[in-house]
Amino acid sequence: MHPLAPRSPHFAPRARRLLILFLTGGFSHVDTFDPKPRLATDHERPLGNGFACRSPFAFQQCGESGLPISELFPHLRSCADELCVIRTMHTDIVEHFQATLAMHTGSATVPMPSLGSWLSYGLGTDNANLPSYVVLAEHLPYAGAQVWDNNFLPPYHQGVRILPGDEPIADVRSPARNATLAELEHRLLQDLNARQADARGGDLNLKARTSSFDTARGLMRVAPEVFDLAQETAFTRASYGVTDGDNRSFGWQCLAARRLLERGVRVVELIDTGSHDNWDAHGDMQQHRSKAQRVDQPIAALLRDLQLRGLLDETLVAICTEFGRTPWSAKPGHKGREHHAQAFTCLLAGAGVRGGTTYGETDEHGNHIAVNPVHVHDYHATILHLLGFDHERLTYRYAGRDFRLTDVAGRVLHQVLS
C-alpha cells in the first residue's frame, strides 16, 4: 500500500483540503480587520508601554454582512462575505521565530510536526503523483524549514518546498533527451531498498527513501504541467495579477496553489516573505501598503476562482500571521508598532466556515482580549475539526507517549462553523 494512500478521517469532514496563506512578520490587527476609533480619540495619550497610535488607514463596511475591512485590502473587500475574522488570537511568546513555530506546529519552544504534516499523516493524498503537502516559499520564513517539517512523524509526511522562479522543482525534467522514466527509476536500487525495508521494518527513513523515488517519478510526470501557467486563460492570469514572464510573484504562487489543490494535493501553504520584506513594521505603518498590495489582489482572485470552480465548498482557507502589533507606539510621533502577542487577528474562509462574521472582541484600543480568547491550539483544533478530525484523537506514539498537534489543550470554535 502506498504510504500516502487516501485515509478516512474520524468523521465526515466539511473540508477535503487545506490552503494556508501565511503572512510573515505580524500584520497589524488594528490596521487591517479590527478597527479601533478610540485610538484616534486617544492618539498619543499613554497606553500600554507607550502612546496610543491611531491607524492611518480608513475602514469600510463591506459586503452584505458589513464586515469592516481596511483600505489596505480593496480587492479582498469584495470577498467579505466569505471571511470569518477571528479577532482574539493570542500566542505564548512574542518573538518571530517562536511565534511562527507555534502557528505551524503548536509548540513555540520545542519543534514538533507541522499542521500540514499532521494532515498528511491523517489523510494521505488524493494524487499519488504529487506530494500530500506542498509549501511555496520564495525565501525561508522565521524558524526555517521547521515550519513544514514532519519531525517524529514518518518522513514522507514532510512538506515539499516549491521555490518560485525559473525552476520550481530542481531536476524535475529528464536529464537525457532519449531516457525513459523506467531507465531513470534505477529499478535495481529500488529492489535493494525494498529488501532492506522488509528486513528492517522499523526503519522509516528507508521506507521514506523508497517513497521519495515514487514521488520523484510522479513529479517528473505531472509537475511541468502543473506549473505551466500558460495553460490558463489570459483573463485568469490577469485576475491574479500575473504578467507575461512572471514565475515568482505572490499572484503566480496563488494561481499555482489553485492548480495543485484541484489536482489532489491535500495541503498547500503559501508563505509570504516578500523579497526579504515582510510585515514587521516597526518604523512606519505605511510600510503595510506595499505588503498588502503584494497579496491583496492574488488572495481575492484565489478565493473567487476557487468559488467559481466549486472548490471553495471543499477547501478550508486559513489566512494567518504569527502575532499582531501594538495599538501603541514607543514614543509620541512615532509611526510604527511593536510586536503584540496578547491579541491579534487571523482569518478562516471556505468549507464549513460562517462567512461575513467576526469572532471575539478586543478592548476599545485593541490592546487586550475582552471576549472569547482564541489560543493557537484552538485555531488548530478548529481546522482539524473541519477536516474531519477530533484533535484529541489524532495522535502519534513517540518516545513512550502519544503526541498531538494541540498538545494537552485546544477547543473547537463551534461558533465560527456554518
Image (cartoon, grey):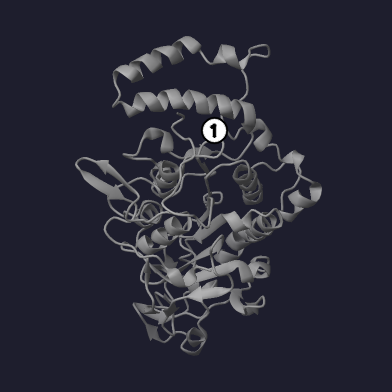
Q: In this view, does 252 lie to the left or right of 288?
A: right
Q: Is residue 134 above or below residue 293?
A: above
Q: Which residue is drawn at 80% across and 51% down?
A: 235
Q: Farthest front residue?
A: 11
Percent position of residue 353, x then y: 54, 65
* Closest to the observer, 276 or 177: 177
Q: In this view, does 265 lie above or below 353?
A: above
Q: Farthest right residue?
A: 234
User: Mark 1 belongs to which amino acid?
Assistant: Ala
Q: Mark 1 points at which residue?
A: 128
Q: Residue at x 38, y 85 (%)?
A: 46
* Closest to the observer, 254 or 186: 186
Q: Farthest bottom residue?
A: 41
Q: In this view, does 402 lie to the left or right of 333?
A: left
Percent position of residue 314, x then y: 58, 54
Percent position of residue 187, x then y: 50, 12
Quadrant location, the N terminus? top left
